[in-house]
Image (cartoon, helix red, strand yellow):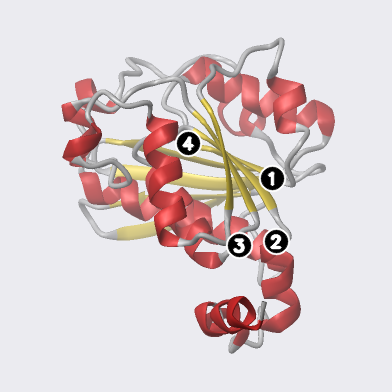
Amino acid sequence: MSKQLDDITERYKGHRALCEIDIPGQRAIENGRVLVVGAGGLGSPVCLYLAAAGVGTIGVVDADTVSLSNLQRQIMHFTADLGRLKVESAAEKITALNPHVRILPLAVMITEENAASILGEYDIVVDCTDNFATRLLLNDTCVSIGKPMVYGAVQRMAGQVFTYLPGYADYRAWFGDMPPRNEQPCAVNGVMNTVVGVVGTLQATEVIKFLSHAGDLLCGRLLLFDAVTMTFREIKNRR
């Protein structure tokens, strides 16, 4: 037991040394339960950083398998994983990175029938999906059950992030209930791989801050990143 405690103390010393997180914040992270919906481009950095941070339980939902075109941006999956379920590949990488993390892989689609029961088991949901219908379903479920959610999306060389907490602007308040024009998957529309990494890392940052109560979250604020001009800008929404 002492060896395990020594491992944990040394592993998380970077967080424990931060006055914004410290020992109580790190313990809160270790007790946290986070659901990541989508184990692709955004889900890869989200899962890896949450695992490295020591989040106690990480649920990963994705019914897809790893394909060759995924590897340009989905850094959690390797060439040897081609054809495997993404959640199986994710579980293997997370465990290899941090054996103290409990990983719950779910190779299912989020539907109206199962959304509330799945999301309700976690402290916060991370939307790493790439289609409008699932985003809207996640949003509406989180709103209905009062569940926090971190949203992220990328398109070509740009991305956006915000965090929903009850009482703040949700996805509908930001984007309405109509799908974006010409919405296409990254493999079709094109995407710069590092932009996915930037946005996923920002999402993971929001989750770690939420669990440890460190800093201000992107509630009522949409953060936009443009890799062409290498700029960030913020839009506020009081709804």
Q: Is residue 137 above or below residue 193?
A: above
Element under disc 4: loop
Disc 4: CA contacts within 10 A as few (<14), some (14-19) or many (>=20): many
- Give the Cα distance between marks 4 and 1: 13 Å
Residues under numbered marks 2 and 4 in contact, where contact means CB atoms less than 8 Å apart: no
Residue 6 x %, y %: 59, 84
Q: Amino acid at mark 1?
A: Ile
Element under disc 1: strand
Res 62 seen here: yes
Q: Give the residue at x 35% y 18%.
A: 183
Q: Is residue 31 above or below residue 123?
A: below
Residue 128's label in the rendered image is: 4
Element under disc 2: helix
Q: Which residue is mark 1?
A: 124
Q: Which residue is mark 2?
A: 211
Q: Give the residue at x 44% y 33%.
A: 87
Element under disc 3: helix
**Which quadrant, please, contains the C terminus?**
top right
Residues under numbered marks 3 and 2 in contact, where contact means CB atoms less than 8 Å apart: yes
Residue 112 x %, y %: 68, 11
Q: Which residue is mark 3?
A: 208
Q: Amino acid at mark 2?
A: Leu
Disc 3: CA contacts within 10 A as few (<14), some (14-19) or many (>=20): many
* First in residue order: circle 2 vs circle 4: 4
* First in residue order: circle 4 vs circle 3: 4
